Amino acid sequence: MSNPGDTAAARRPSKGERTRTRILASASALFSRSGFHAVSLRDIAAHAGLTHAGLLHHFPGKEALLLELLGHRDRVDAADLFPTALDAGAPEPAPEQWLRRLLDVVARNSRTPGLVALYANLSAEAADPDHPAHDYFVRRYRVVREGTARALGALFAAADPPVEEDPNAVAVQLIALMDGLQTQWLLEPDTVDMPAQLRALLRRYGIEPAPETEVSA
């Protein structure tokens, strides 16, 4: 029989892992505040309580750090919300489940203002094709847009009477509403209820997903 203490020790992050986590947290905070281009590796190192050389021991450059930060968020979303985002062979959720999970993302974001600010800043900067996160955001928007359009198309066709709207256009509008709500919520978090506004839009098309579940941040 194994010693319970051995199991606990095996799960305990190493010093290097703890340092990487601290670096990623500092990068997230600074990128959220100032964007990618305005922040240097030395800024991140100082924020994390490291030397510049100490940071480079874990990440070879700022682009590698950014992509690791975005990749971590993507892995969480793929595991908890959109499994097809990273695994093309994974089964896609049922249409109602896809929309519930989309609402879960919004509900989770309303509890993590730093994450919302990070994505708002980086997605705007990444419109530049030379930005290191450009391909990441193009791919992420495409995955969510196409999955949402498929879900809406199935629900529109199953409605009685069928909804005579283009699901691709509605998916684009829904995601645009999500982005716009995020900016308004960052400015006035006590005034803007992001999940409620998205539900109101879906109700216009006769869609009422079940209440969101708790999703880990």
Image (cartoon, rainbow, N blue to C red):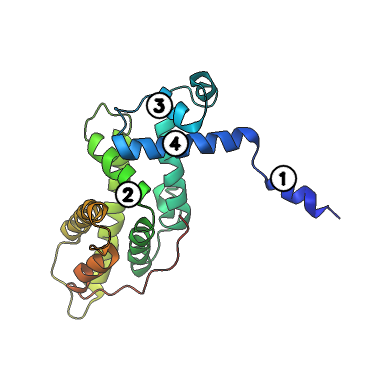
* Vertical relation: 110 (above or below) 123: below
Q: Identify residue for label 4.
A: 26
Q: Identify residue for label 2.
A: 116
Helix, strand or loop at mark 2: helix
Distance in Å between CA atoms under marks 4 and 3 = 9 Å
Distance in Å between CA atoms under marks 2 and 1 = 33 Å
Q: Is residue 6 rendered to the left or right of residue 11? A: right
Q: Position of residue 123 (x, y in %)?
A: 27, 40
Which sits earlier in the primary sequence, circle 3 or circle 1? 1
Helix, strand or loop at mark 3: helix
Image quadrant containing the N terminus: bottom right
Residue 43 in which image quadrant: top left
- Viewer-nearest of labels 2 and 1? 2
Which sits earlier in the primary sequence, circle 2 or circle 1? 1
Q: Position of residue 142 (x, y in %)?
A: 28, 47
Q: Identify residue for label 1.
A: 10
Which sits earlier in the primary sequence, circle 4 or circle 2? 4
Q: Amino acid at mark 1?
A: Ala
Which sits earlier in the primary sequence, circle 4 or circle 3? 4
**Numbered label attached to residue 43:** 3
Which sits earlier in the primary sequence, circle 4 or circle 1? 1
* Vertical relation: 163 (above or below) 15: below
Q: Position of residue 134 (x, y in %)?
A: 28, 34
